[in-house]
Amino acid sequence: MENMRVGRSLVFANPRGGVGKTTVAFLSTILMATIKPPRDKKKYVYVEMDFGAESATKIWDASFKVEGENTLKDYLLDKCEIEDIAYTSSRNPVYRNIAFIPAGKITDVKLNLFAKYEMYVEKLDELMDFLWEKSEKIVIDCPGSGGLNYLRDYLLILPLGDSFIPVVEPDIPSIDSANSLIDLAMLMNLNYPLFIFNKYEKKYHWILEEAKRKLRIGETQQPFFTVRFDKKIMEYWSKLELKVNGCKAVEDVKKFVSYILELPEEFSKPTWKAKEIFKVIKHFRAVRRLQPEHLLRKKRSKRSDVSSELEILAGMKEKRFEK
């Protein structure tokens, strides 16, 4: 633990949907705000970036009508100001220390974030500048399946964080998906303090061992936290609500939240990395061994290797990467 650090902006990520990433990220925000209330009128800020599912919005307040309200999507499209997209709620007492930024709906996958990268970098820079001094922690809930969930969008989203927390479930594809993002996170110099193994049951012990083998890196050997499968969470989900007591999964989330809050803080405002991302892409010297077969969703493209994808992103005709 002495070598671990945690930043102010925490990115909960996995390109696969259904792993429980939003549930874990949202519970983490609630529990951080409960265990360590913010100081100096600051807030714990939850930024929903899943423009497809909008699951967090439904959990946060099922009565909140996204249609007609300003969202992150509207801000990125220059239709409103930063001050117009952060909301508070009196629906639950634990929400009083939380500011929530809803994603808004983008149904056309062709409108991926990376398509207007340069414009969005500037807008997200402004957003992070605005949030930085007003936030105790910033939790970023990344896209899963549906909506924006490709490598291109993660190249824009990951630099917004200074700590990367992958969430996996008991199956190999979700582990491999998280594994590919670790390369990008390390490339962007994000802290990697731990990973979450969600929906854990004893029968999945062998898959947990596989997750430990694939997701722990270097000499630091990141700790992991299991979140037990609990039908109560499923019941809360069906009612579009989450409770913070009387649930095994909540008890488990509380353990790693307490761990995060005990870690020394080491962070710098992260969005400068987004401005340099093309330089990073051109060099693409990952700390770990790159696994191209895991970086792309082959079904969306005939290209079968990551170099072809990054050539297009970087506007290059030819590119070779060092192994």
Image (spheres, rainbow, N blue to C red):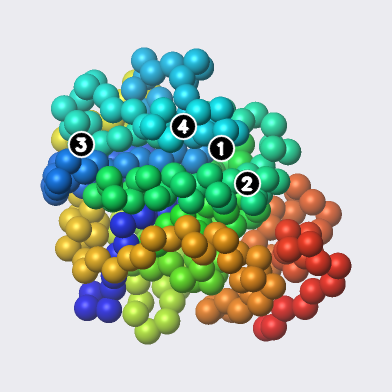
- Which residue lies under the disc numbered 2? 119
- Which SS class for mark 1? helix
* Among the two numbered marks 1 and 3 on one chain, the one whose residue lies closer to the N terminus: 1
Structural distance between the alpha carbons of marks 2 and 3: 31 Å
- Which residue lies under the disc numbered 3? 97
- In which quadrant is the C terminus drawn? bottom right
* Among the two numbered marks 2 and 3 on one chain, the one whose residue lies closer to the N terminus: 3
- Which residue lies under the disc numbered 4? 81
Mark 3 residue type: Asn
Mark 2 residue type: Met
Residue at 51% across, 38% down? 50
* CB under 8 Å between discs 4 and 2: no
The quarter of the picture where residue 181 lies is bottom right
Residue 106 position in % (x across, y down) = 61, 30
- Which residue lies under the disc numbered 1? 76
Residue 130 position in % (x across, y down) = 37, 45
Structural distance between the alpha carbons of marks 1 and 3: 25 Å
Residue 152 position in % (x across, y down) = 65, 53
- Which SS class for mark 2? helix
* CB under 8 Å between discs 1 and 3: no
Q: Is residue 153 above or below residue 219?
A: above
Structural distance between the alpha carbons of marks 3 and 4: 22 Å
Mark 4 residue type: Glu
